[in-house]
Image (spheres, rainbow, N blue to C red):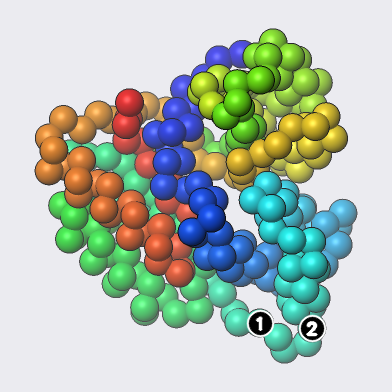
């Protein structure tokens, strides 16, 4: 199994660090409410989107009671806000492709905020489809190997048996890929096998990567990604910046 996942390149600003854990839980809860409302069920067995969000929540150690409360809130008549899914596509400094996925109850707030950050840090928003053609949506499970105790061959065998398509060894993590519709089944099988995840979610994986050479471009890109991630309406940020 091989790949070009570049976990650190794609996900560097997406880690569930303790300082951002509360914000991560809030964003996942919002995503869970939308999944319940659009899927028409609070049972993950009958709502595949909800099952995917629950897998994502469990991977970042969101408490079970918090997951249950969120689902109950979404099921309660008249509770919760009506969120709209938005996707923004554009370019960072020197043509780095960027996709921003948002859930918002006010697009007139969210869209100008996103555009402002692109403009401020020497990027620009583009039309729908301007960069997404160069990305592929996959299920992505990141297995913690910080202590380097895991054997690559064993992880590969377990991942294949779980139904995964691909595996990438990134040193302190293993990145497992599968079809988006297989994410829940694969993550549950690997969890049952004793693996600890950094994340488990649907991801947009770039087909190629762009390097930044100028210090100014690097600083602008770092700051733009940081502020996009901090925006309460932004759920995910995907890009093809090669940070190695």
> Residue 114, percent across and down?
32, 64
Residue 75 lies left or right of residue 228; in this view the side is right
Relative depth, front residue between 177 and 196: 196
Looking at the rendered image, the quarter that the N terminus falls into is top right
Q: Among all residues in the image, which is located at the extreme bottom?
A: 78
Q: Position of residue 71 (x, y in %)?
A: 77, 70
Going by the image, does 117 lie left or right of 138?
A: left
Helix, strand or loop status at disc 1:
loop
Between 173 and 40, the residue placed more toward the observer is 173
Percent across and percent down for residue 221 are 25, 46
Residue 86, above or below 131: below
Q: Which residue is mark 1?
A: 80
Which of the image's four quarters has the C terminus?
Answer: top left
Element under label 2?
loop
Asked which quadrant contains residue 159, the reply is top right
| Residue at 77 percent of width and 26 percent of height | 163
Whether residue 237 is visible, yes or no, is yes
* Res. 76 mark: 2
Residue 18: % across, % down: 53, 55
For the residues labelled 1 and 2, say whether their Cβ atoms are less than 8 Å apart: yes
Q: How busy is the neighbourhood of tag 2: few (under 14 within 10 Å), some, or many (20 plus)?
A: few
State the separation of the CA atoms marked 1 and 2: 8 Å
Q: Residue at x 12, y 35 (%)?
A: 214
């Amino acid at each position: 199994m091989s790949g070009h996942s570049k976990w650190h390149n794609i996900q560097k600003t997406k880690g569930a660090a303790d300082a951002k854990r509360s914000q991560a839980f809030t964003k996942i809860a919002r995503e869970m409410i939308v999944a319940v409302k659009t899927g028409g069920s609070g049972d993950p067995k009958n709502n595949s989107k909800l099952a995917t969000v629950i897998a994502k929540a469990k991977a970042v150690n969101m408490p079970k009671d918090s997951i249950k409360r969120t689902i109950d809130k979404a099921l309660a008549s008249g509770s919760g806000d009506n969120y709209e899914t938005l996707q923004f596509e554009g370019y960072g400094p020197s043509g780095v492709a960027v996709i921003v996925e948002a859930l918002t109850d006010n697009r007139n707030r969210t869209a100008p905020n996103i555009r402002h950050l692109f403009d401020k840090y020497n990027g620009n928003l583009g039309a729908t489809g301007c960069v997404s053609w160069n990305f592929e949506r996959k299920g992505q499970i990141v297995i913690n190997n910080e202590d380097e105790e895991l054997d690559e061959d064993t992880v590969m065998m377990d991942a294949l048996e779980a139904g995964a398509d691909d595996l990438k060894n990134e040193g302190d993590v293993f990145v497992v890929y599968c079809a988006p519709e297989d994410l829940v089944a694969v993550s549950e099988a690997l969890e049952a096998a004793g693996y600890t995840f950094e994340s488990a979610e649907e991801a947009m994986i770039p087909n190629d990567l762009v390097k930044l050479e100028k210090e100014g471009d690097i600083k602008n890109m770092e700051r733009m990604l940081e502020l996009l991630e901090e925006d309460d309406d932004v759920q995910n940020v995907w890009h093809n910046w090669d940070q190695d």
